[in-house]
Amino acid sequence: MDQTVAVSRSDQDGAGNAYTDLRGWLKRLEETGRLAIARPETALHFTLAGIANRNDGDRATIFPNPSGHSGTVVSGLLSQRAWMAEALGIAEDDLLDRFHDAEKHPLTPVEIDDAPCQEVVHENDFDLADLLPIPVHNEHDSGAYITAGLLISANPKTGIQNVAIHRLQLSGPRELGALLLPRHTLAFTDAAEAEGADLPVAIVIGASPACMLASQAIVPIDFDELGIAGALCGAPLEVVRCKGSHLVVPARSEIVIEGRLRAGKRAPEGPFGEFPQYYGERDDRHVIEVDRVTTRRKPLFHTIVGGGLEHLLLGGIPREATILAAMRRSHPGVVDVHLSRGGVCRYHLYVKLKRREAGEAKNVILAALAAHYDIKHVIVVDEDVDIHDPTEVEWAVATRFQADRDMLVIPGSQGSKLDPSTQNGLGCKTGFDATVPAGSPEFKFRRIRVPGEEEIDLEAALDPTVTIKDVLS
């Protein structure tokens, strides 16, 4: 392997042998045939993203020295649900329960003084484009973007941190444009601006799988997601204090960009290819001024291609865990939920229900729509339907649903501002009750099955040595 992409020891510790940094997980992918290495000098403009997309869901990809840059890019690290579970050392079926438990029982991070992410420090006379291999992904993106950076900030009033992923446009040698949607980072920025102050931030690139997942948790304000990252791995996360602020960051990450969200400053940002697989529009948005960059020696730059599987699943799985827990509080018959890939892991929710009462499915639909404003369409099915198989869900709608009886329509509802079919986020939500109608004769909706089909040993049952000629002779 090229020296610039060599990974260190397999960093596994904590409960269930979770991988506690990016390099340990890369080594696991390499050992199991799920890591591809591109030829050196792959173009940072488009070609890198195109190769990553072609490998998406099959293999992660390492790009040494893209466009002749001295750095290395990695992509596609967590582009299957099963990979995410494996990275945490658990079974795929336990993923949502583990995430919910980590939200309920976070582990306070442990601060250390000497951290890998601060082995090299850049403070004077650097240009981000020269320092970091930042790709351009989609055709009409406004330029190079940091897409897998965990933006860490703290509430100016309480000092409690928040971790989130925001798209970050390379706007100048030491300047980034940031899209801040109405969530915690924006609330902290507004509070600082009200006092005429900049908001210190740290952008962490190349964090562990647990940190990436934890950043997408739906938790109240003043809840540090780094505690969730530790709980996901079964041991407190090691963190280090930034060189120029009070913020703490994952100690074993690859790159940390330290800077400030500038009070009152706005500049053009976008367009950018987003998770709905359309472009987020150009507008005047917040600006980050970069003060310094610290890195490991020969750091790995993690990029997430907009609209790819890694992008969708990182946002979808934490949402599923939160939505499932919220719905079960009122509806214990909810067995499982799934944000489908066709619904960009945000807008379409499938719910598996062990129904107890007539009309319960409609109440479940209302609870689902209230669980997160991004949800646009909800389909509720019975226990016999595999909600991770879109063909099964479509079959339930085709054979158990009648629109005049089983559909709920709620116009004028708050939705996602990134859904281009809405009016700045205002749209219509729809629920589909695709469960067996209450009081139906038992045999009317009984699924066909061949007894013993699943237990047949197909290899033993078939004879590959016999041809059609042998049969007809």
Image (cartoon, grey):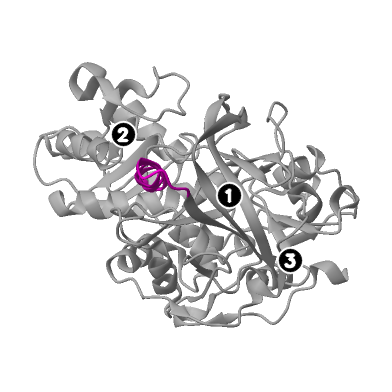
Task: Locate the N terminus by quadrant.
Answer: bottom right
Left or right, 426 with reference to 83: left
Amino acid of disc 1: Glu
Disc 1 marks which residue? 310
Kindly identify the residue that appears in the image at 78 percent across and 68 percent down: 298
Farthest residue to the front: give it. Answer: 196
Crowding near pointer 1: few (<14 within 10 Å), some, many (20+)?
Answer: many
- Tell me which numbered mark, 2 or 1, is placed earlier along the sequence: 1
Left or right, 167 with reference to 75: left
- Tell me which numbered mark, 1 or 3, is placed earlier along the sequence: 3
Residue 262 - label = none
Residue 340 is situated, as x and y percent measured from the top left of the image, at 44, 40
Q: On the image, which quarter does residue 359 sit in?
A: top left
Q: Is residue 362 or residue 450 the one in the foreground?
A: 362
Looking at the rendered structure, the secondary structure element under dot 2 is strand
Disc 3 marks which residue? 299
Residue 378 - label = 2
